[in-house]
Each structure stands twice: as C-alpha cells, then as structure tokens.
Amino acid sequence: FAVNSVSGAFALSTLTGIPTVLSLLIVVAIVVAVAFVGHDLVQVFERYSSYFLGAIFLVATITIFLHADFGFTQKAGNFSFGGFTLAAGAAFGYAAGWNPYASDYSRYLPAATKRTAIVWAAGLGNFISCVVLMAAGAAAATIAGFNPDDPTTSFTASMPVVIKDFTLVAITIGAIAANALNIYSGAMSFLAAGIKIPFALRRAIIALGFGVVGFFIAWSVLPDAGHTYENFLLVIAYWIAPWLGVVLVDRYLRRGTEIVTIVTDAARYRNAAGISAFLIGLVVSVVLFSNQSFYVGLVPKVAPMVGDLTAIVGLLLSAAAYLLLFRMIRPRLGAPLGNMPSAVPGVDAADATA
C-alpha cells in the first residue's frame, strides 16, 4: 500500500506542482474512499480505469522506445550477474505479489467459468503489463538516467508535454487502482481468518487502518523511495516464492479432488506439511541467499557476484520439502470433484455477506 501510494504521490506532485506530502494525502484519501464502498465499486473502477491506463501506457511506452539507447548496456559495460539477479528478484516480487489476492476475486466468478479463460486472462494480463512496462522503465533510464529520489520524472523525461501529463495522470490512477485491491483484500483476510465481525465493519477497519498507517509509512520513505521500493519488492519475493512452491505442488497433488468441504471452520482442517515446507524454504533461503541492505546472507557475503537468489531457492526448496512431507504426513484429501456439493454451509454464507 505504502509504496504504491508513493508512486502516485510523485506523479501527482510532478503533474500539479503541489508538495509531495499533500499529493500523498490526496492519493491515500481516494484509495480509502474507493475501497470503503466495497467490491462493486472496486470492480467498476478497475474495469474502466484499465482502458484508460492501457491506452496511455501504450503511447508512453512507444514514445520511450523511440528515444531509448538500446546499446547503452554494452557501451557502459556495467552488466553483472549479481545485478541481474537482484533486478530479477525485485521484478518477480512485483509480478508474483498479486498471487495471494487471486481467490479474493475469482470467488465471485460463476461456477461455470472456464478455467482456461481465467488462466489466460489473469496470466497474460500480469505477464504482458509487467514485461512491457518494466522494459519501458529500463529503456527510460538509458535516456535521462535514473534518479531514485524522483523516479517518476526519470520515467517521463523524454516524453512530449501532452503525453507526459497524461502518463502522470495514468500513474496516479494506477496507484489508486492497485491500492484499492490491497485494501479490499485486506478486508477479505479478516474473513479468511474467521474473525466474527460484520463485513462492512471489517472493510472500514482495514480501509482506515491501511490509510492511516500506510500514509505515515509512505511519508517516511519519500526521501529514499527508489531504494526502499527495491528492498520492499525483494522482501515480498522472499516469502511469496516459498508460498508459491507449496501452493503449486499442493494443487498438483490434490488434482481431481475438491477442497471446499475441508476448509470450513467446522472441518477443523490442518496441514502441517504446508506450513513446515513453507518455513523451511523461507528460513533457509533468506539465511543463505538474502542480499538486502539490512541483512546479507552467508552466500552473498562470500560470493557477492551471485546477487540475490533467495526467491528461486525458496520456491524450489519449499516445493521439494512439501512434496516429501505430503507423502510422509498424508494430509486429508477432499472428495472427487464430481461429488462436490453445490453449496457448503459456512463457506457460501460467508460469501454472501462479503
């Protein structure tokens, strides 16, 4: 929430000339208002903003590529494997960071929705947007350099005034759209945790809590936003990667079975293999391979040229550990998919209130 708010604040400040802190306050207030209303407004806002954002970022990307110096890396001679793995880890942290939110929105899709349609829509939407805009960001740095204290200006430096202004508006709206999802999914986490308070109150608590806490965190990182954002994305990758390792293997091992009836509160289902494998992947990968400003792992201390391999090691290690532990512990499986009930008490009732 905080880092997305910072990007929106920089864009709004560059566009209007108002102080960055005031821009940050405006962005946070709009995000809280959208998320507070709930899923329907979030869905409408995301749908229509995506058309505008897609068109503007397409024009902005073309403009950047037309001015980019594609021979910059070779001329500067500054490529290194360590730098590549650090950048790849941060990129993975952003792209994969949305994975835990998926079921917060897929839960509203009709049961008859084709799985392939969901996979292609979500997968390509994430992949294409990340690849294109990250490439545009790298290309922009070859034109005007990169200022970590004001990355928005660096990104738009080569653009004509009109395109630049529209791009700044798009960055601001994009930050609001991303954070609306953050806040709504935070409210959904209350539901998943089984906290028994009305959903509207959960949404209000999360919206206001994220807004207040997020504003002050974002304010504190404004002086060094670039490096803080990089560190944040790497930390996200550190825990998302082993989580994904467990989830992907679990989906494979449970293929052909349903999970709806075993995840209700009444089922009291526990899977020790999952949390154990996750912790193994997380702890081992961070202790050995982390390359952060606040902690450097044992491997980068000895061999700095490796950069940061935490995410890939965490994913593979947790996946292997879960595969082994699953076969040893044998957690309970659901019934065959053909026997899945159309409605489950404790699950569908909660959906109706959300």
Image: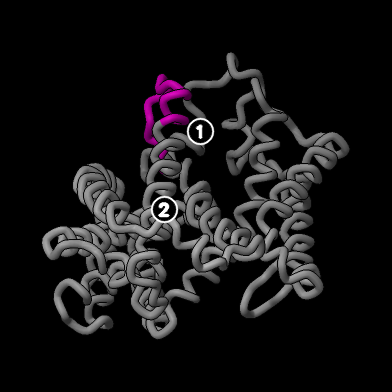
Along the line of sight, the residue nearer the viewer: 76 or 93:
76
Image location of residue 138, percent across then percent down: 42, 60
* Residue that appears at 38% across and 46% down: 129
At horizontal 39% and vertical 69% (from top left) the residue drawn is: 210
Say if the magenta span includes residue 118.
yes
**Exactly how many numbered labels are in the figure?**
2
Tell me where residue 288 sits by quadrant. bottom right
The spot of residue 196 in percent (x, y) is 48, 55
Q: Secondary structure at mark 2?
A: helix
Q: Which residues are magenta?
A: 105-120
Q: Which mark is residue 345?
A: 1
Whether the magenta-drawn stretch holds residue 183 is answered as no
Decide: is 62 above or below 298.
above
The N terminus, quarter of image? bottom left
Left of 173 or right of it: where is 119?
A: right
Left/right placement of residue 271 relative to residue 101 reads right
The amino acid pointed to by label 1 is: Pro
* Other-residue count near label 1 (Cα within 10 Å), few / some / many at <14 / 14–19 / ≥20: few
x 49%, y 75%: residue: 228
Q: Earlier in the sequence, mark 2 or mark 1?
A: 2
Residue 135: which numbered mark, if any? 2
Relative height, residue 112 to residue 347 (above, below)? above
Q: Residues within 10 Å of mark 2 (few under 14, many from 20)?
A: some
Identified by mark 2, the residue type is Ala
Q: Would residue 75 appear left or right of 141 to someone viewing this image?
A: right
Residue extending furthest toward the top: 338
**As drawn, which residue projects farthest toward the front?**
75
The quadrant of the picture occupied by the C terminus is top left
Q: Viewer-proximal residue, 282 or 155?
A: 155
Foreground: disc 2 or disc 1 = 2
Q: Is residue 35 visible?
A: no
- Quarter of the image holding residue 301? bottom right
